[in-house]
Image (spheres, rainbow, N blue to C red):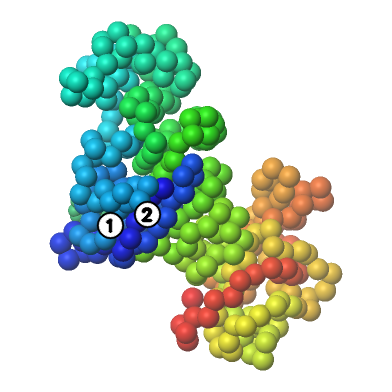
Amino acid sequence: MITLGNISKRFGTFEALKDINLEVRDGEFLALLGPSGSGKTTLLRIIAGLAFPDAGRVAFNGEDVTDLKVADRKVGFVFQHYALFKHMSIADNVGFGLSVRPRSARPSKADIRARAEELLDLVQLSGLGDRYPTQLSGGQRQRVALARALAVQPQLLLLDEPFGALDAKVRKELRRWLRQLHEQMGLTSIFVTHDQEEALELADRVVVMDHGVIEQVGTPEEVYMTPGSRFVSGFVGDTNSLPVTIAGGTAKFHDRPLTLETGLVADGPARLDFRPHDVTIAEDQAGCLPLVVTDVYRRGGEWRVEGSVSGCSQVLEVDLDATGPAPQPGQRLALRITRGRLFPTDGVQP
Ligand SMILES: Nc1ncnc2c1ncn2[C@@H]1O[C@H](COP(=O)(O)OP(=O)(O)OP(=O)(O)O)[C@@H](O)[C@H]1O
């Protein structure tokens, strides 16, 4: 549905987006995920028509829209800083996009009101149309912002950190609800987040960005299980990193060989990334890491164990089944890494 071809954007000499290519499918729920300053919002604004690229093209359904302004793109958007109009009732806020249409395309006042009521029903705020924004909670205001975005019947919904300012529980509820709404209405939605949990939970596909480039595009499963770069491996999901050396197909940590497939990684220094759950506790030390436990706490059905390994400055985090007794601080565990990813470090130890 949306094609971005070779999009670049500079602010002065700073390159905010560098040659971005991306296809968004019809009906897809896509997350733009990356650290602060990676270019997510700039890319979303370019898709919306709120900003324009220095180079490259934007097409919707094969039609070039690069130079079309926001009002002509038929997109709905919820940007954090586009707050509700304080002096307008909730119903008027929701109907705003319809009331500013040119006279020939503008529905009657009664129709706009009826449409606003319908949308307030949809976002589960029936009966609150006559209130004002200050009389609603943060979560309710976000839902009004969504209703306002949906009033113009967009095919494409763009959301920039829509739940950023809300507390964790409300955020979670709204996320689930947004996903349902997306499906119910047959929308194509793109949302910006720096919260990887939000991206992995909500999106059909995740676009991981860093420094103005796309590092990887994939399903949540793909970016989590088979990260395509060192950056994605460290940014998506909890990751432990160890400096290792590969020699003759064996990964060694300070001359201690680890029982781990090294695949096609060339001999030399590398970074070994592994998830907290990709470990088991072994009886003996062969092929294992000696972890000294520093802290233990429960995370659902698992013990999250923090510990240190001599020769590595990073605190390691591992998850162990909590049906067994909790390891104690000071205890030594022989950690066997069952699955990891190796990234050559070109002579530079991480
Ligand atoms: N109007 C502007 N003028 C100058 N620099 C800008 C402008 N807008 C964005 N930038 C810069 O471009 C880079 C990308 O900004 P952008 O807002 O797209 O990042 P982001 O990934 O959305 O970050 P965040 O998660 O913090 O919102 C940043 O370094 C930012 O400072």
| Residue at the image point whose x is 42% and y is 55% from the top | 23
Q: Residue furthest bottom?
A: 248
Query: Where 229 falls versus 135 (above or below)?
Result: below
Residue closest to the eye, 228 or 69:
69
The answer to whether residue 129 shows anywhere in this view is no
* Local secondary structure at mark 2: strand
Residue 3: mark in rendering: 2
Q: CA distance from mark 1 to mark 2?
A: 8 Å
Residue closest to the eye, 185 or 134:
185
Residue 100: mark in rendering: none
Q: Residues within 10 Å of mark 1 (few under 14, many from 20)?
A: many
Horizontal arrangement in the rendering, residue 256 relative to residue 41 (left or right): right
| Residue at the image point whose x is 39% and y is 13% from the top | 117
| Residue 192 picture location, percent across and down | 40, 46
| Residue 37 picture location, percent across and down | 32, 56
Q: Residues within 10 Å of mark 2 (few under 14, many from 20)?
A: some
Q: Amino acid at mark 2?
A: Thr
* Local secondary structure at mark 1: strand
- Labels 1 and 2 touching (C-beta < 8 A): yes
Residue 57: mark in rendering: 1
Query: Where 70 falls versus 55 (above or below)?
Result: above
| Residue at the image point whose x is 18% and y is 24% from the top | 102
Query: Where 284 falls versus 218 (above or below)?
Result: below
Q: Tell me where residue 243 sits by quadrant.
A: bottom right
Q: Amino acid at mark 1?
A: Arg
